[in-house]
Image: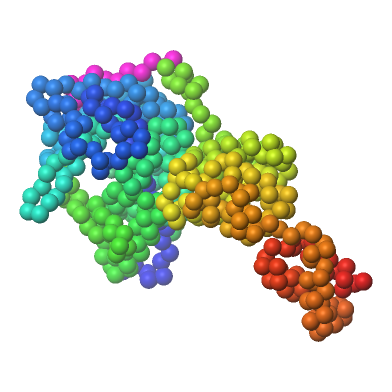
C-alpha cells in the first residue's frame, strides 16, 4: 500500500501536430489551404481532392518540395539535426476517413531529430525542453455524422502535417502551456503554419504520468488526445494528474491508455487501453523514394530564417527597456509584435523617442488593455478596427499628458468597437486632460474649504492624506484633471 503522504512529481511529454500552410497537399496537387478570408465551412465537400487523396488504385504520391522546406525550417528553429536521409512509412489502420487503409508518415527515420526549445516560466526562470523528433505525415479526412448515417469529407486528407515530439521533460501543466505557446510562436513566426487553433492548425496530444518524488523510473503514462487550446491542455493535465494520484493512493495501478478531454465537464475519460491499441504494421512506403536532402539546401534555408521569438524578445528588452514578461507576451504573438514595431516607427513622427518611455507605453497598452479586448472579442489585431497610426497617436497624447491613462483605455475601447480618429474621439467624449492651473485652483480651494478635518490631519504631519484631496479633485473633474499637477497644487496650498 502506498503511503498516503507520498509527494508526487508530474512528468509530461507532448506530441504536437502542426498543419503546414502550403498551397497544395503533401502528396498531391489538391489545394491544402483555402484562399485568405475563406473558411473550411464555405468549402464544397470533397472539392479539394485528386485520386491521390481519395486513394484510387493506380494513383501515386509525389512529394511536395515546399512541405520539406517547411519541416526543415521547423527543425532549424528548434535546433534539431536535419537528417540527410529520411524515409516515409505506411501506418496502417482502417477508418473511413483514410481510404488507402494507411496513413503516410515517418517512423524510424524522421526528417529532424534531437532539438530543444527554451521556455520562460512566470517567476522569470527558464527551462530547456528536449525535442525528440519532427516527422512529416499526411492528415486524414473527416467523418461527418448525421442522423442515422455518416458521410466522409476528404478535403483534409493529405493536408501536410509535421508532428513535433518532445522529451518527457515537463514537470507541470504551466510548463506544458509555456512549451506549447513557445512552439506556436515559432511556427507562426516562421510562416509555416496559419495558426488557426479553432480549425485545428495546431493540436496537441499530452502524455502524462506521475512518480513518487525522488524516484527515477517514470510512472505509467496516459495520453490525452487532440486538444487544441493551450488553456485546455493545462486543465486536462491538471485533471489527469489528480486522477492518477487518487488511483495510486487507492492502491490501484494507472493503466496505459488513450484518454479524451471533455472541456465542458473538465474531465478526461478513457478512449482505448493499450491492449486495444492497434498494431500499425509500419513499413517503408514503396511508392515513395527515401527523402534525401542536400546539406547546401539546409544551409541556404538557415540563412533565410526570420528573427525568432526569443531573439526578438531579447532585442525588445535590450533596445527598448521592456521587461522580459511584456517582451515575451509581445513576441509570442506575431501580429502583436508586428503591430508594436509598426507603431514604434510612427512615434518619432510624433516627436517621441522610443527609448525614452514611448516603447514602454506601447507595450503596456498592447499587452494589457489591447490584448484583453482582442481576446474578449476574438479578433485578430490586423483585421480589427484598431489601427497602428491611431494607436501611436493615442500614445502620443498620453506621453504629452493631454489625456490620462484612464481616458486612454476609454479611447482604446472606442477604437476597437468602431474605429475612428483619436483626436476626434477625445474631443467628442470630452477626455482632454485638464492641465490648466487656473481651472484646477478653484476646484482645490473648494475642496480644502469643505474638509477642515483632513487639512488639520495634514498639518499635524499625516502627509499621506494628500491622496484624499487629489482623489476628491479627480472626482470633481470627472477624472479629467492631470493628477501630477493636482498633487503639486494641493501641496502648495496646504503648505503655503
Ligand atoms: P508513442 O509513439 O507510443 O506515442 P513515444 O515513446 O514516442 O510513444 O512517446 C510519445 C510521447 O510520450 C513523447 O512526447 C514522450 O516524451 C512522452 N512520454 C514517454 N514516456 C512518458 C512518461 N512515462 N510520462 C510522460 N510522458 C512520457
Ligand atoms: Mg503517441
Could you say which quadrant of the image residue 34 lies in?
A: top left
Q: Position of residue 363 (x, y in %)?
A: 61, 47
On the rendered structure, is 90 left or right of 459?
left
Which residue is depicted at the point 31% across and 59% down? Answer: 263
Q: Nearer the viewer, residue 211 or 468?
A: 468
Q: Position of residue 189 (x, y in %)?
A: 47, 35
Which residue is depicted at the point 21% across and 31% down? Answer: 48
Q: Residue furthest left?
A: 148
Q: Nearer the viewer, residue 8 or 418?
A: 418
On the rendered structure, is 446 left or right of 331?
right
Please identify the quadrant where the C terminus is shown. bottom right
Which residue is depicted at the point 63% across and 54% down? Answer: 426
Please identify the quadrant where the N terminus is shown. bottom left
Q: Position of residue 105 (x, y in %)?
A: 25, 32
Do we see residue 282 in this rendering? no
Which residue is depicted at the point 39% across and 32% down? Answer: 192
Residue 412 part of the magenta segment: no
User: Where is 50 relative to 195, above or below?
Assistant: above
Do we see residue 493 in this rendering? yes
Could you say which quadrant of the image residue 91 lies in?
A: top left
Q: Nearer the viewer, residue 261 or 79?
A: 261
Residue 294 part of the magenta segment: yes
Q: Nearer the viewer, residue 408 or 13?
A: 408
Ligand 2 occupies quarter: top left
Q: Which residues are magenta?
A: 283-296
Amino acid at each position: 500500500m502506498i503511503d498516503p503522504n507520498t509527494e508526487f512529481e508530474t512528468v509530461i511529454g507532448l506530441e504536437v501536430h502542426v498543419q503546414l500552410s502550403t498551397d497544395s497537399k503533401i502528396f498531391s496537387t489538391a489545394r491544402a489551404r483555402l484562399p485568405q478570408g475563406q473558411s473550411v465551412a464555405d468549402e464544397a465537400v470533397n472539392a479539394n481532392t485528386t485520386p491521390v487523396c481519395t486513394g484510387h488504385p493506380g494513383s501515386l504520391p509525389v512529394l511536395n518540395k515546399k512541405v520539406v522546406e517547411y519541416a526543415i525550417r521547423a527543425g532549424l528553429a528548434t535546433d534539431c539535426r536535419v537528417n540527410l536521409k529520411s524515409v516515409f512509412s505506411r501506418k496502417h489502420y482502417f477508418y473511413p476517413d483514410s481510404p488507402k487503409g494507411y496513413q503516410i508518415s515517418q517512423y524510424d527515420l524522421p526528417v529532424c531529430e534531437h532539438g530543444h526549445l527554451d521556455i520562460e516560466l512566470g517567476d522569470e526562470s527558464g527551462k530547456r525542453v528536449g525535442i525528440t523528433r519532427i516527422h512529416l505525415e499526411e492528415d486524414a479526412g473527416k467523418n461527418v455524422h448525421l442522423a442515422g448515417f455518416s458521410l466522409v469529407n476528404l478535403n483534409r486528407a493529405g493536408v501536410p502535417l509535421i508532428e513535433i515530439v518532445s522529451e518527457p521533460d515537463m514537470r507541470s501543466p504551466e510548463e506544458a502551456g509555456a512549451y506549447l505557446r513557445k512552439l506556436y510562436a515559432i511556427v507562426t513566426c516562421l510562416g509555416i503554419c496559419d495558426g488557426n487553433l479553432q480549425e485545428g492548425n495546431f493540436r496537441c496530444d499530452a502524455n502524462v504520468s506521475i512518480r513518487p518524488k525522488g524516484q527515477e523510473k517514470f510512472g505509467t503514462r496516459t495520453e490525452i488526445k487532440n486538444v487544441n487550446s493551450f488553456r485546455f491542455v493545462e486543465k486536462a493535465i491538471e485533471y489527469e494528474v489528480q486522477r492518477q494520484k487518487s488511483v495510486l493512493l487507492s492502491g490501484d495501478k494507472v493503466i496505459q491508455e488513450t484518454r479524451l478531454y471533455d472541456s465542458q465537464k473538465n474531465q478526461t475519460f478513457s478512449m482505448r487501453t493499450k491492449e486495444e491499441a492497434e498494431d500499425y504494421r509500419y513499413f517503408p512506403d514503396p511508392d515513395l523514394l527515401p527523402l534525401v536532402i542536400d546539406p547546401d539546401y539546409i544551409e541556404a534555408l538557415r540563412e533565410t530564417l526570420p528573427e525568432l521569438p526569443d531573439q526578438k524578445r531579447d532585442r525588445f528588452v535590450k533596445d527598448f527597456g521592456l521587461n522580459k514578461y511584456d517582451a515575451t507576451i509581445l513576441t509570442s504573438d506575431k501580429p502583436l509584435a508586428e503591430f508594436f514595431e509598426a507603431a514604434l516607427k510612427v512615434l518619432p513622427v510624433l516627436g517621441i523617442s522610443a527609448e525614452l518611455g514611448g516603447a514602454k507605453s506601447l507595450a503596456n497598452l498592447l499587452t494589457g488593455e489591447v490584448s484583453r479586448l482582442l481576446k474578449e472579442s476574438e479578433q485578430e489585431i490586423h483585421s480589427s478596427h484598431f489601427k497602428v497610426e491611431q494607436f501611436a497617436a493615442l500614445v502620443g497624447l498620453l506621453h504629452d499628458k493631454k489625456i490620462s491613462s484612464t481616458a486612454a483605455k476609454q479611447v482604446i475601447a472606442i477604437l476597437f468597437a468602431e474605429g475612428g480618429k483619436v483626436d476626434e474621439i477625445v474631443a467628442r467624449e470630452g477626455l482632454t486632460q485638464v492641465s490648466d492651473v487656473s481651472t484646477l485652483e478653484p476646484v482645490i480651494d473648494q475642496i480644502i474649504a469643505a474638509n477642515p478635518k483632513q487639512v488639520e490631519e495634514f498639518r499635524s504631519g499625516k502627509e499621506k492624506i494628500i491622496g484624499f484631496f487629489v482623489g476628491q479633485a479627480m472626482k470633481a473633474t470627472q477624472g479629467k484633471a492631470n493628477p501630477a499637477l493636482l498633487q503639486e497644487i494641493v501641496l502648495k496650498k496646504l503648505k503655503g
